[in-house]
Image (tube, rainbow, N blue to C red):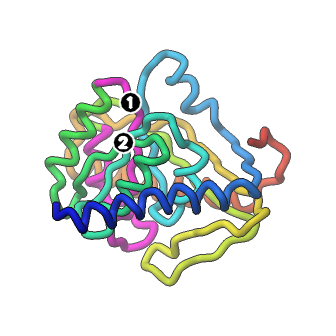
Amino acid sequence: MRRRDDLRFGLAGILGRLLVGGLFTTTRCVRRGQEHYLQFRRKGEPVVFAFWHGHLLPLVHYHRNEGIVVLVSEHGDGEYITRIIHRHGFGAARGSSTRGGARGLRGLVRAARAGRDLALTPDGPRGPRQEFKWGALVAAQLTERPIIPLAVAATRAWHLGSWDRFMIPKPFATIRIVYGPPVWIPRGAGSEDLVALARDLEGELGRLLRVAVGDDVGDSGS
């Protein structure tokens, strides 16, 4: 990487950390279903978080400094994302189901074996939006760790014109994060099985999002 590029990416990481931290100082977070992943953390066993690409920003803040390793695409924007999440205490495995996938999977497997949680966006890096690509299940299959599906909603937010309608909560919004029950991917599942499981998880993410959008703000806040 050229020195000028490295400087640009480094500055992006610093600015991203400051901007994200400033934005979320005014927001309130309500979580539901945390027991689904905390049961594994109490035993020191990693999980695989799965959520839509457009929901990434609130999760970067509210799961900061937990050592979670995120699968980040090797396309140009991926380096910016990597620098920003590193500033928030995440790790990154570079690759995707469409480019550099094998290298990304190896990084995820190593991280899971080291006891670190993983995070995947199964509709990334380029969409289609909220379509669960079955390739994202391979990481859970190889690591033999459960998938924890989750969805995020905000009472007030901007949505970018990007393919994922990237969500940026507005100041003083309430963020709702809903976690679903663990889903295990059988070691011997073939491609047809993975396609069916992906459709099931796509439906589950849709259900969780409906809960997050319509949930009464009465659970534990943070």
Question: What's under tag 1, amino acid-wise?
Answer: Arg
Q: Position of residue 90 (x, y in %)?
A: 42, 42
The residue under the point 36% across, 58% down is 10
Give coordinates of residue 67: x percent, y percent.
44, 35
Q: Where is residue 145 drawn, in percent x and y?
A: 36, 31
Question: Along the horizontal axis of the image, is 10 left or right of 221?
Answer: left
Residue 211 appearing in the image: no
Q: Are marks 2 and 1 in contact (CB under 8 Å)?
A: yes
Residue flagged by tag 2: what amino acid is it? Gly
**Residue carrying label 2:** 91
Q: Secondary structure at mark 1?
A: loop
User: In this figure, what is the number of numbered marks?
Assistant: 2
Give yes or no for residue 70 being in the magenta stretch. no
- Front-most of residues 193 and 110: 110
The magenta region covers: 114-140
Query: Front-most of 60 and 207?
Result: 60
Q: Quadrant of the N terminus?
A: bottom left
Question: Mark 1 sits on what residue?
Answer: 116
Corner quadrant of residue 45:
top left
Instruction: Check residue 135 for magenta coloring.
Output: yes
The overriding secondary structure of the stretch rendered in magenta is loop
Asked if one can make out residue 17 in the rendered structure from this viewpoint, the answer is: yes
Say which quarter of the image contains residue 108.
top left
